[in-house]
Amino acid sequence: MKENSLNYAQRNSEEFIAELSELLRIKSISTDPQHSQDMAKAAFWLETSLKKAGCQSTQVYQTPGHPIVFGEYRSVAAHAQTVLIYGHYDVQPVDPLELWNTDPFTPKIIGDYLFARGASDMKGQVMASIKAVKSVLSQNENFPLNLKFILEGEEEIGSPSMPDFLKIHRDILQSDIALNPDAGMLSIDTPAITYGLRGLAYFELTVTGPHHDLHSGQYGGAIHNPAQVLCEIIAKMHDEHGRITLPDFYKTVKQPGKEERTQLAALRQDDSVFLQQTGVQGLWGEESFSAIERIGIRPTLEVNGMVSGFTGSGAKTIIPSTAMAKISMRLVPDQEPSAVRNQLEAFLKENMPKTVQWELLELAGGPASLVNLDRPEVQAMTDALAKVWEREPVFLRAGGSIPIVAQMQSCIGLDSILTGFGLPDDNIHAPNERLHLPTWRRGIDAIIHFLYNLL
């Protein structure tokens, strides 16, 4: 039966890509209220896709934010295991649009790559899961696994509706394991299972000076410029060694053990890899830690965006009335977003000059998470990836945040297997996002193997 399912996936590969392209055309940008109708459109499109895949029951649940899509295949087999497959259908904004080589919502295949916003993160991974299930169920009238899907539209904004949804719908979500393909691979020929994710704390800091923009000739030198204040405040958030200066920021951060550092070093992700992937002239960060350690097992603080004053072409001599920055922290286990907010507020109270006013808004947050690698389901995925790629997967602690993983652990006691088939150079969250189609096809095969390995 497994070979029949694999053959089905191979025969229908072009149809799968065409359907993925349909989903990619929907502008499901969750952070932009102007795309709320697109979010709903994507949700109902996915519900239809789940029905076609073999789910006997489906439903689109409305939330205070964007819809959550649920689908379920119920096996007739007694005592069948239950796998809950997670995904998100929302995508990041496309800015800066002028840097795209193709229209971000008009999918285009160039060579082995499919270019579009969401192609890799994570509509491609969602469709790989759905098509793997379709390939299995189409060849098995009574497949002896229960399969559930939960597809949300708010992952890119911190999954604010998910905790309440998990609590309210605890009964229908009960499962033995969750499969989350929102991680990725180490390289094109190196599959990976992610056992750790960093948490997130995301803020918007606004500094206000005069009640309107001022002529810089008339008032410059007498009025404290909010843009200058914001730049100086942000500059103080790191010291000369790359360490974050918020009070007590590292209080609960554990030093990595020798074994973990040895495992990370064995991945052979030295500075040259990061230089090649990013195009920068040199690396930066916390001293005494390698780049692979900084992005996986150490906390960070980053400025994600800044806006102030006149930014158009030409010159306009003003002192802006306000300056705003988006600031995010990636957190490691034992760091709580609420504690980090308190630390940031304490830093601002101590360092913000009395010549301006400031406001701090918390936009998103979630704790870090670790996965138990001893579970048999992890071995089932390990064997599946090894079968398809003909090499054992590596085990990673990823730098990114997937709020649902910790939320599932805390709300319904459900562990997740984190994998995925995106590549480091897929340009996720950036212009020219792309999906490597040969790897995507192999990903479908790997999920098929995984589901059969659980039997």
Image: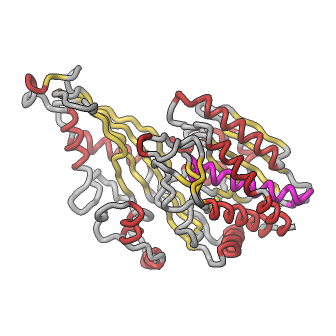
- Give 240 or 277, whichever is nearer the viewer: 277
Q: Is residue 137 magenta?
A: yes
What is the x, y in percent for residue 84? 72, 53
Q: Is residue 342 magenta?
A: no
Work out whether residue 158 can be spotted.
no
Q: Which quarter of the figure is the N terminus placed in?
A: bottom right
Q: Which quarter of the figure is the C terminus placed in?
A: bottom right
Q: Image point 51% across, 41% down: which residue?
A: 157
- Give 161 or 249, whichever is nearer the viewer: 161
Seen as rendered, the residue at the extreme front is 111
Q: Seen in the image, is 393 located left or right of residue 338?
A: right
Residue 274 versus residue 404 in the image, above or below: below
Among the 4 quarters of the image, the one containing residue 295: bottom left
What is the x, y in percent for residue 206? 31, 33
The residue segment tinted magenta is 118-144
Q: Image point 48% across, 60% down: which residue?
A: 425
Residue 46 versus residue 309 in the image, above or below: below
What is the x, y in percent for residue 418? 61, 61
What's the coloring here? secondary structure
What is the x, y in percent for residue 201? 43, 47
Among the 4 quarters of the image, the one containing residue 291: bottom left
Number of numbered callouts drawn:
0
Q: Image point 58% across, 59% down: which residue?
A: 111
Work out whether residue 361 can be spotted.
yes
